[in-house]
Image: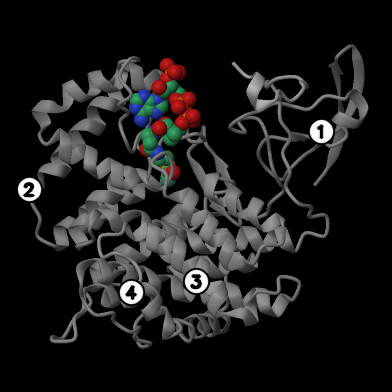
């Protein structure tokens, strides 16, 4: 990383601040000494101009629609690799050799079972609980089951916790699904690959043979790759902030899951499908486009727009292709939801409101239709997102913990409340 410096005039004072350059992307002004020199903080709610950390993991160019993991384009990883290979890349920085890949797959596969007492833990939930509520609680609870991997100062324990979470997340997610539909939990099967094993745990029942459809399993694996990491988004920043206090990794990932649940973030795939169902038919699209454009109407086109991408989300393109492959494999020719989605996308991409505001479909637009066709209930969509994003959260958490300059994250504020005033006794208050 090269660096220079820049001058800033703040409150009448000239301040010289270091400028740091990354390998690609915008440089940053290091404002760490600004308060000391001027007595002022910077103010950037929503972090639109603020880099919160230095990272070597993921790069996004939102204007060009580029997403790179450790330098490799997402399109190439999704086309040629599998999810566990992307996991290895995110965690260790390089693509694995055949031996490293075989060893990694083996280690993940050997960690897929969860502590048997977790089953009883599940029974405390209502059957109609949202599976994301179950995920937040059960992943947080892992720290109560795996004490031997919560010492974050020990690199071995950090690695064991990371492997455990990547391996156990599908098992816990499938348990959340099985619990909600009232079917018995299905144990993982070690002769199946990561995505096939997940399909097996979600959809097989003890009374009959379940054969994993390889087209669906490949599509699901690709969906996992597309969701694996996405730079310093809200949930990843949540994980980093939680981890900056030294909290154990299971607790940090539970915090990330809680953040991901929101409809402006991971919850958008569920919201996008609900919106397509509400629109119902191509004839109703103009009415909903008008609602989305109306400043006085809170309605937004779910699955459209992104804080960073001001061009087509590269993941959305792959997701759209995957969606068509899945529907073809399942023989779904006339899906009214797909018709609505295709037409909505066509209209929005040519409507001046969306064009001027650079609102393109994001990954969530087509993922809902695909997952629904595969047999997942709507409330499982964000769970699948959390499952796949776990590796990104862990890689980012690990990078932060291993940074020798790491300090607790502690933002400051612009205080606009009352100035100091004296306490008034209860009897004297009006
Ligand atoms: N439909 C209609 N108008 C929209 C939409 C939308 N989906 N998204 C943004 N706009 C408009 C806003 O009203 C605003 O208009 P204005 O400038 O006239 O006030 C302008 O575009 C900019 O929008 P902001 O909300 O300021 O953009 P921000 O970067 O804060 O929000 C977000 C990004 C949250 C993704 C937003 O586009 C949105 O709510 N989209 C729908 C939800 C969604 O799909 N989320 C998934 C994100 S991807 C992910 O997490 C995997």
Which residue bears the numbered disc 3? Answer: 166
Residue under pointer 4: 123
Q: Which mark is residue 422?
A: none
> x, y percentage for residue 141?
50, 70
Does 68 sit above or below residue 98?
A: above
Going by the image, does 314 lie left or right of 211? right
On the rendered structure, is 48 left or right of 336? right
Q: Does residue 45 appear left or right of residue 318 in this picture?
A: right
Query: What separation in Å lies between label 3 and label 1 (alpha carbons)?
Result: 36 Å
Q: Earlier in the sequence, mark 3 or mark 2?
A: 3
> Horizontal placement of 151 versus 58: left or right?
right
Dot 1: element: loop
Which quadrant of the figure contains the C terminus? top right
Who's the residue at 28% across and 41% down the image? 272
Q: Residues within 10 Å of mark 2 (few under 14, many from 20)?
A: few
Mark 3 vs mark 2: in front? 3
Answer few, some or many: residues within 10 Å of disc 3's Cα (few below 14, many 20 plus, some between 14 and 19): many
Q: Dot 1, how many residues are within 10 Å of its Cα: few (below 14), some (14-19), or many (20+)? A: some
Q: Nearer the viewer, residue 92 or 38?
A: 38
**Residue matched to label 1:** 31
Q: Nearer the viewer, mark 1 or mark 2?
A: 1
- Residue 369 lies, in percent from the top left, at 22, 50
Cα separation, mark 4 vs mark 1, equals 50 Å
Between the C-alphas of marks 3 and 2, the distance is 36 Å
The residue beneath circle 2 is 334
Ranked by sequence position, the earlier of labels 4 and 1 is: 1
Eye-nearest disc, 4 or 1: 4
């Amino acid at each position: 990383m090269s660096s220079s410096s820049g001058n800033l005039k703040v409150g009448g004072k000239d301040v010289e601040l270091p400028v740091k350059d990354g390998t690609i992307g915008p440089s940053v002004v290091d404002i760490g000494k600004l308060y000391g020199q001027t007595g002022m903080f910077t103010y950037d709610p929503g972090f639109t101009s603020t880099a919160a950390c230095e990272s070597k993991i993921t790069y996004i160019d939102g204007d060009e629609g580029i997403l790179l993991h450790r330098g490799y384009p997402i399109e190439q990883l999704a086309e040629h690799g599998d999810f566990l290979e992307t996991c290895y890349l995110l965690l260790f920085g390089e693509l694995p050799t055949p031996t490293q890949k075989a060893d990694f797959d083996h280690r993940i596969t050997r960690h897929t079972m969860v502590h048997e007492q977790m089953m009883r833990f599940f029974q405390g939930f209502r059957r109609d609980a949202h599976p994301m509520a179950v995920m937040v609680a059960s992943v947080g609870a892992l720290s109560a089951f795996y004490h031997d991997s919560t010492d974050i100062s020990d690199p071995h324990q950090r690695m064991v916790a990371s492997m455990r979470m990547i391996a156990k997340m599908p098992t816990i997610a499938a348990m959340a699904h099985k619990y909600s539909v009232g079917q018995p939990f299905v144990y993982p099967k070690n002769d199946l690959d990561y995505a096939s094993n997940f399909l097996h745990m979600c959809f097989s029942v003890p009374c009959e043979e379940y054969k994993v459809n390889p087209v669906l399993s490949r599509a699901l694996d690709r969906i996992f790759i597309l969701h694996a990491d996405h730079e310093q988004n809200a949930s990843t920043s949540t994980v980093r902030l939680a981890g900056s206090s030294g909290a154990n990794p299971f607790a940090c990932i539970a915090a990330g899951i809680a953040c991901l649940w929101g409809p402006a973030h991971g919850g958008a795939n569920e919201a996008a499908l609900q919106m397509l169902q509400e629109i119902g038919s191509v004839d109703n699209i103009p009415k909903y486009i008008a609602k989305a454009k109306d400043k006085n109407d809170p309605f937004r086109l779910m699955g459209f727009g992104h804080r960073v991408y001001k061009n087509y989300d590269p993941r959305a393109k792959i997701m759209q292709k995957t969606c068509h492959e899945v529907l073809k494999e399942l023989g779904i020719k006339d899906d009214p939801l797909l018709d609505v989605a295709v037409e909505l996308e066509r209209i929005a991409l040519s409507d001046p409101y969306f064009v001027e505001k650079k609102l393109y479909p994001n990954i969530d637009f087509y993922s809902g239709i695909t997952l629904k066709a595969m047999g997942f209930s709507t409330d499982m969509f964000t769970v699948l997102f959390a499952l796949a994003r776990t590796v990104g959260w862990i890689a980012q958490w690990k990078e932060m913990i291993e940074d020798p300059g790491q300090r607790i994250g502690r933002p400051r504020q612009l205080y606009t409340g009352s100035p100091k005033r004296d306490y008034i006794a209860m009897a004297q208050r009006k």
